[in-house]
Image: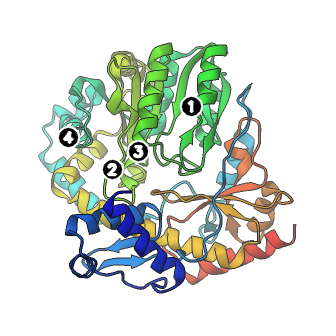
Amino acid sequence: MKRYEKFADQIAQLIRSGMLAPGDKVPSVRHASRTYGVSPSTVFQAYYLLEDRGLISARPRSGYFVRELAQHPLAEQETSAQSARTTAVDVSELVFSVLDSLKDPHTVPFGSAFPSPELFPLPRLARSMAHALRDMPAHAVIADMTAGNPDLRRQIALRYMVSGVRLALEELVISNGALEALNLCLQCVTSPGDLVAIEAPAFYATLQVLERLQLQAVEIPVHPREGIDLATLADSLARLPVKACWFMSSLQNPLGASMSEEKKRALYELLQQHQVPLIEDDVYAELYYGSQPPKPVKSFDRDGLVMHCGSFSKSLAPGYRVGWVAGGRYAEQISRLKLMTTISPSVPAQAAIADYLQHGGYDRHLRKLRHALESQQDAMLASAARHFPPGTRVSRPSGGYFLWFEFPEAVDSLQLFQLALAQGISLAPGPIFSATRGFRNCARLNHGHPWTAQSERAMEVLGRILAAF
């Protein structure tokens, strides 16, 4: 065991024993270094490890503190495992019923797919749009429709470079949000009736796209912490004519699972061996809680097999509908298909985001956003521990704004959805995340909104409903 791991275990034992209580400040780096006789870098490494374990969290300019749920957490799920299977997809009506539940602004939005708009710098974005439009050359209104705003593409390419991915600008295609990018990618490499490997559970929009394109799903189980089951995927690729994979390798929706770099590399090598393209849905990439951003599978791509899709909808500007795809060998085909359908996302919206990325303090905003989401995750976990019945299990994502709950077997989350909605509470029931309508005793809850007394009351109401099953 390395020195920083031993020191981390010492601090973890103080937390578990109650010597350091939830909310207490852990020793400062300088004090810990002097008291325990270790270097400051060892203390930093230990605290980063404790952050990853969910025991402590950093507060800007204040130090590290014991997280509220560190002593008495709900258990994590062991696995979401189910056997890989091939199936047609028919979930849209179920999904639309959940989305309809969010139209009432008085409904507690635990079922929402977005964080609170209060967390986004919308006034600053408005100033960026005004500035960008004032300085935009007249010809750019037309010229930027095809390839996309050049300043925006450069800013996106720079962020890829920081994460270790070097891209030619020609590989980037700007889209109407990530969902259009994902649709275009899938259309480039499949035809009706083809098999597509997806996660189980999977983001419900994935299922709706497959349904619309008349594609069949091959569901691959996802471990709540480790991500895609590579052994099951390898078996499926060996047995079945899978035409493409659509996976979230980091902060997967709904589980929040993130694959390690080793597993991401192994995933790429497996797909490269079978020459099966990967559509990498990475819309939550900027919402990690730790000190280091997760590397995408795209960073291991040697021959353009990975189509990496991103968006500003979850991290900056949900209503602007600006996304992109780094299309690899498929970039030109994706671009042409886009011109045959929507032509271009909003040119003013692209210009506004480009201006904000250059001048608005995007990284400063992201640090505040990540801290807010992590604090709200703590609040929801603590509330669930107080109110939800024994036997409830929950995921522990290292980022994002979703928690995946597995309730006792007697719970039917579709009934739970209806009963909760009657009390003014929305949630996302497990079956909308499965082509086979599995995960019936599971639900996804959104903690992306500021935690209030109303949030706490809603969790208490959900606890009473769950206890009645």
Please say if 44 is above or below 60. above
- Taking the image as shown, residue 274 lies to the left or right of residue 59, namely right
Badge 4 local density, few (<14 within 10 Å), some, or many (20+)? some
Label 2 with label 4: CB-CB less than 8 Å:
no
Q: Point out which mark residue 158 bears.
A: 4
Q: Which is in the foreground here, disc 2 or disc 4?
A: 2
Q: Mark 3 sits on what residue?
A: 321
Q: Which is in the foreground here, disc 1 or disc 2?
A: 1
Q: Name the secondary structure under disc 1.
A: helix
- Taking the image as shown, residue 290 lies to the left or right of residue 194, namely left
N-terminal label among 2 and 4? 4
N-terminal label among 4 and 1? 4
Q: Position of residue 269 (x, y in %)?
A: 44, 23
Q: Point out which mark residue 230 bears.
A: 1
Q: Amino acid at mark 2?
A: Pro
Please state, as top left, top right, bottom left or bottom right, where the N terminus lies in the image: bottom left
Cα gap from disc 1 to disc 2, whole angstroms: 23 Å
N-terminal label among 1 and 3? 1
Task: Identify the residue at horizontal 28%, vertical 69% (top origin).
Answer: 43
Towards the viewer: 99 or 469: 469
Please say if 222 is above or below 97. above
N-terminal label among 4 and 3? 4
Q: Which is in the foreground here, disc 4 or disc 3?
A: 4
Label 1 with label 2: CB-CB less than 8 Å:
no
Q: Position of residue 106 (x, y in %)?
A: 62, 72
Q: Position of residue 29 (x, y in %)?
A: 24, 75
Label 4 with label 1: CB-CB less than 8 Å:
no
Q: Which is in the foreground here, disc 1 or disc 3?
A: 1
Please state, as top left, top right, bottom left or bottom right, where the C terminus lies in the image: bottom right
Q: Mark 2 sits on what residue?
A: 293
Q: Is residue 458 visible?
A: no
Task: Identify the residue at horizontal 53%, vertical 30% (top origin).
Answer: 246
